[in-house]
């Protein structure tokens, strides 16, 4: 029995389909913010290495960008919770 067969058997049940949908929503929804935060912090460290005097400006913009990226992850979590418990 392959993975797709198992997935199909779970999806036949309504609760199984909700669990699969919530897992996919959270997994894909967390992937974008994780990549974005990693790139953002990496670029901020490069900028600090090149121009240490601009630390305050770079840090402020980095924290703001991380907060926006993290908000997308929280939206994905809320979507997964709605799928799992409400629908």
Image (cartoon, helix red, strand yellow):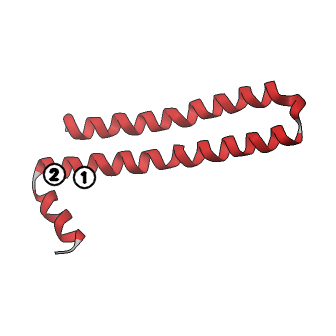
User: Quick one: quadrant of the N terminus?
Assistant: bottom left
Density class for disc 2 (Cα within 10 Å; few <14, some 14-19, many ≥20) is: some
Distance Cα–Cα, label 2 vs label 1: 6 Å
The residue that mark 2 highlights is 16
Q: Position of residue 80 (x, y in %)?
A: 31, 40
Residue at 20%, 63% (x, y): give it: 7
The residue that mark 1 highlights is 20
Pick the front one: 74 or 47: 47
Could you tell whether 37 is left or right of 10 in the image? right
User: Quick one: quadrant of the C terminus?
Assistant: top left
Is the Cβ of the residue at disc 2 closer than 8 Å to that at disc 1?
Answer: yes
**Outermost residue toward the left in this view:** 13
* Quadrant in which residue 42 is drawn: top right
* Quadrant in which residue 11 is drawn: bottom left
Q: Secondary structure at mark 1?
A: helix
Residue at 86%, 30% (x, y): give it: 54
Q: Is residue 2 above or below residue 60?
A: below
Q: Position of residue 63 (x, y in %)?
A: 65, 29
* Quadrant in which residue 84 is drawn: top left
Density class for disc 1 (Cα within 10 Å; few <14, some 14-19, many ≥20) is: some
Could you tell whether 18 is left or right of 38 in the image? left
Which mark is on residue 69?
none
Q: Is residue 24 above or below residue 9?
A: above
Residue at 69%, 33% (x, y): give it: 62
Pick the front one: 37 or 71: 37
**Outermost residue toward the bottom in this view:** 1
Q: Is residue 5 above or below residue 42?
A: below
Q: Position of residue 37 (x, y in %)?
A: 60, 42
Q: Position of residue 43 (x, y in %)?
A: 74, 45
Q: Secondary structure at mark 2?
A: helix
Could you tell whether 3 is left or right of 66 in the image? left
Residue at 49%, 37% (x, y): give it: 72
């Amino acid at each position: 029995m392959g993975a797709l067969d198992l997935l199909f058997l779970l999806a036949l049940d309504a609760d199984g389909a909700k669990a699969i949908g919530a897992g996919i929503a959270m997994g894909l929804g967390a992937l974008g913010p994780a990549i974005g935060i990693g790139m953002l912090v990496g670029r901020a460290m490069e900028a600090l290495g090149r121009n240490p005097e601009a630390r305050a400006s770079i840090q402020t913009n980095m924290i703001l960008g991380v907060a926006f990226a993290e908000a997308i992850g929280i939206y994905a979590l809320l979507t997964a919770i709605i799928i799992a418990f409400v629908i």
